[in-house]
Image (spheres, rainbow, N blue to C red):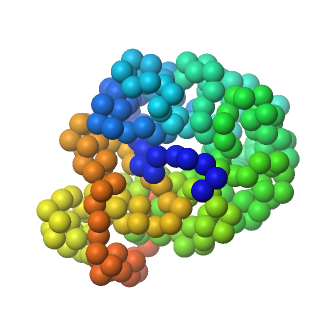
Amino acid sequence: MAIEMPRLGLGTYTDDDQKGRYDAVKTALDVGYRHVDTAQVYENEAYVGAGIADSPVSRDDVFLATKTVHNTVPESTDLVRDAIEGCLDRLGVDSVELCYVHWPVGVYDAESVLTTYQEAYDDGLIDHIGVSNFTPEHLETAREVLDVPIAAHQFEMHPLLPQEELRADAREHDYWAVAYSPLAQGAVADLDPVVDAADAHDTSPYQVALAWLLSKENVAAVPRATGREHIADNFAARTLELSDDELDAIDAIEERKRCIDPEWAPWN
């Protein structure tokens, strides 16, 4: 693997209590997480950065990822460099381990946006370049523009949306497929194969769904969580070993559901 990254991170998206991300980040680092994921559009980077700064865990030990270039932010690709620097300012850091292009829509232009990301990489502002919500065609174009390999591609992935094609691309080109909404916003708790495995291991369906993802090659996950119990339960998925039969049963789920599906998404 071209980049070392903790396979289970803390997702911080929320549409309500942004300040709560501060406590969640501190708690997650205390539990053992070393990968924290945020984004410009989440409007919580300042709280995430403060949570990291106020934790006894060294900044050098935290893999910090953010995202910019949204469908409405910034207003022009001329502001991409400003957007990247703005993320760093709000996080209170000189650089981040990973910066994603959030969506390949709206103001996104592969040549101008990725060239600017490349310049930020060359200048040491970002250690690795990632993309998010890309189609296979977008990924191919990005590889043609960038002078460095794509380090990670973040997209929705869970037992109801296994994303075989995107995972295959990650394996072929040796980068991380990072799952957001890996619990399908709680829907995994209603899936019989997931519940059966949870009962067999005396654990939660959420832990099982994450363990299923982590059993896949080149796959990482960034589940959202707030309370210590939920944060710790998710983290324990790193050591949960499901049997081949349990993994096969989850693989065999035929129902499909996409939780994040705006009309302007590139697959629509």
Residue 106 % position (x, y): 72, 46
Number of disc labels:
0
Residue 63 visible from this viewpoint: yes
Residue 110 % position (x, y): 81, 49
Residue 71 visible from this viewpoint: no
Q: Is residue 66 above or below residue 4?
A: above
Residue 131 % position (x, y): 65, 49
Q: Could you tell me which quadrant the N terminus lies in?
A: bottom right
Looking at the image, residue 59 sits to the left or right of residue 116; the answer is left
Looking at the image, residue 114 sits to the left or right of residue 207; the answer is right
Residue 56 % position (x, y): 36, 21
Name the residue located 48 percent from the left edge and 25 percent from the top edge: 59
Q: Is residue 171 above or below residue 153?
A: below
Name the residue located 54 percent from the left edge and 23 percent from the top edge: 91
**Front position in the image: 226 or 265:** 226
**Front position in the image: 153 or 172:** 172
**Front position in the image: 114 or 201:** 201
Looking at the image, residue 139 sits to the left or right of residue 29; the answer is right
Name the residue located 82 percent from the left edge and 48 percent from the top edge: 147
Name the residue located 27 percent from the left edge and 51 percent from the top edge: 236
Q: Could you tell me which quadrant the C terminus lies in?
A: bottom right
Looking at the image, residue 30 sits to the left or right of residue 267; the answer is left
